[in-house]
Image: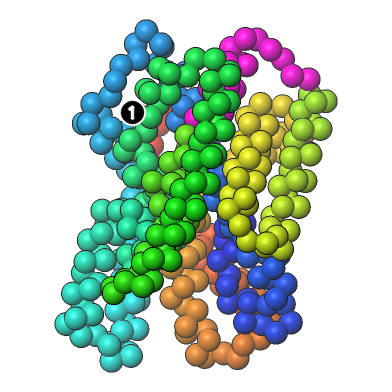
């Protein structure tokens, strides 16, 4: 999934006359991967709660506990995020100086943006004005905002939803709420364009007030899954093989075809349902595709996915201008630039991941 997101960030490919239209129509689509990660996050948080906190020990979380939960879930990746921020600020300021745009007004505007981004609150604005520097980090910002209320969400869900019927009804309600808010936020975005000042122009896609329903859907799925596993029910490997292959083909087909569908909020519902099926199917971890995904190389890719996510985008964004200024717009240039982005990203990711591994407590021999 992380590579789908990376591929969707190679927007410079759309400028190529030979493949630009093909890229935009069939490859520029990160939606299913982004939605998948939000659902997976909710699934993992709820499953962890169900495994660690017995029903009789469940209690309402305090504000302090919610804050600590949010901090704990970003603590490991936050230094990397700050490093990408520093790189992005320096690169953006360098371009501003080169363009003779480094004024007091510019610095004042950027200072406000820096504060908002350092606090990881940029996605709450729904404005690309604030979602700047490492643009891809809106995802981390949205997750952080949701993490801050997740202990409360988990507690409420575990209190009010105790049967598969209520789990399913709440799952349907969460999909409905995400679609309803998409309609409402589209209207807000359209209205903001008529007002002075920065537009609220990305609320539908990034807002934690809407994305929280994706996380809640993942939590609903975790409760259904936990109930099935706790009951001792066994699903045969043959059924899981068929289910994994079918849902994978559906997801792949939808990835290539999504941009060909007429635009509409119905697509948000399809995205959520398909991602829910993906998360739920592969949670059972019993088919051949699951076995392949369990190989060490794939597991490692999963562990470094957030590193790749945060590192690749500033490289792609701030070197893109240099490439376009120095080289002609050609397929060879694009391919070499992609090789540069990926090589640099992998190298930095490997260095940082190994450093973080050394920080982990070692098992006594």
Magenta segment includes 28: no
Magenta segment includes 232: yes
Pick the front one: 276 or 10 = 276
Residue 25 vertical placement versus 272 (above, below): below
- Report the colour scheme: rainbow
Question: Which residue shows up at 22% across the image and 61% down it?
Answer: 115
How many marks on residues? 1
Write down the residue under mark 1: 152
The image shows residue 95 at horizontal and vertical percentages of 35, 83
Question: Which residue shows up at 44% across the image and 60% down it?
Answer: 187
Residue 101 vertical placement versus 361 (above, below): below
Q: Is residue 310 visible?
A: no
Q: Is residue 21 left or right of residue 213?
A: right
Q: Which residues are magenta?
A: 219-236
Pick the front one: 365 or 253 = 253
The image shows residue 3 at horizontal and vertical percentages of 61, 56
The image shows residue 307 at horizontal and vertical percentages of 46, 53
Q: Is residue 182 left or right of residue 14?
A: left
The image shows residue 206 at horizontal and vertical percentages of 43, 55
Our reading of the magenta stretch's main secondary structure is helix
Q: Is residue 323 visible?
A: yes
Question: Which residue shows up at 49% across the image and 53% down it?
Answer: 183
Question: Which residue shows up at 68% across the image and 77% down it?
Answer: 20
Helix, strand or loop at mark 1? helix
* Quadrant (top left/top right/bottom left/bottom right) for the C terminus: top left
Q: Residues within 10 Å of mark 1 (few under 14, many from 20)?
A: some
Residue 48 vertical placement versus 29 (above, below): above
Report which quarter residue 112 is drawn in. bottom left
């Amino acid at each position: 999934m992380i590579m789908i997101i990376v591929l969707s960030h190679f927007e410079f490919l759309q400028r190529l006359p030979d493949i630009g239209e093909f890229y935009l129509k069939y490859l520029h689509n990160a939606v299913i991967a982004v939605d998948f990660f939000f659902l997976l996050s909710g699934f993992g948080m709820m499953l962890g709660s169900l495994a660690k906190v017995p029903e009789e020990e469940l209690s309402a979380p305090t504000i302090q506990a919610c804050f600590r939960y949010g901090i704990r879930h970003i603590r490991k990746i936050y230094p990397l995020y700050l490093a990408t921020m520093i790189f992005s600020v320096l690169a953006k300021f360098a371009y501003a100086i080169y363009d003779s745009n480094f004024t007091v007004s510019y610095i004042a505007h950027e200072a406000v943006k820096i504060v908002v981004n350092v606090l990881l609150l940029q996605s709450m604005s729904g404005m690309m004005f604030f979602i700047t520097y490492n643009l891809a980090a809106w995802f981390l910002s949205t997750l952080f905002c949701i993490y801050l209320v997740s202990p409360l969400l988990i507690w409420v869900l575990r209190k009010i939803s105790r049967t598969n019927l209520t789990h399913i009804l709440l799952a349907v309600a969460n999909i409905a709420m995400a679609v309803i808010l998409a309609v409402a936020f589209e209207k807000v975005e359209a209205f903001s364009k008529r007002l002075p000042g920065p537009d609220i122009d990305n609320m539908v896609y990034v807002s934690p007030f809407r994305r929280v329903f994706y996380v809640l859907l993942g939590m609903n799925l975790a409760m259904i899954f936990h109930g099935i596993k706790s009951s001792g029910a066994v699903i045969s490997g043959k059924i899981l093989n068929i289910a994994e292959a079918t849902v994978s083909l559906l997801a792949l087909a939808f990835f290539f075809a999504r941009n060909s569908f007429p635009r509409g909020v119905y697509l948000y519902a399809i995205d959520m349902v398909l991602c829910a099926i993906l998360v739920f199917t592969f949670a059972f971890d019993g088919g051949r595709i699951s076995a392949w995904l369990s190989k060490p190389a794939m597991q490692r890719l999963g562990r470094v996915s957030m590193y790749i996510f945060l590192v690749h985008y500033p490289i792609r964004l701030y070197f893109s201008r240099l490439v376009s200024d120095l080289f002609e717009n050609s397929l060879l240039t694009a391919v070499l630039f992609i090789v540069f982005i990926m090589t640099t990203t992998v190298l930095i990711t490997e260095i940082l991941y190994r450093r973080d591994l050394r920080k982990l407590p070692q098992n006594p021999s």
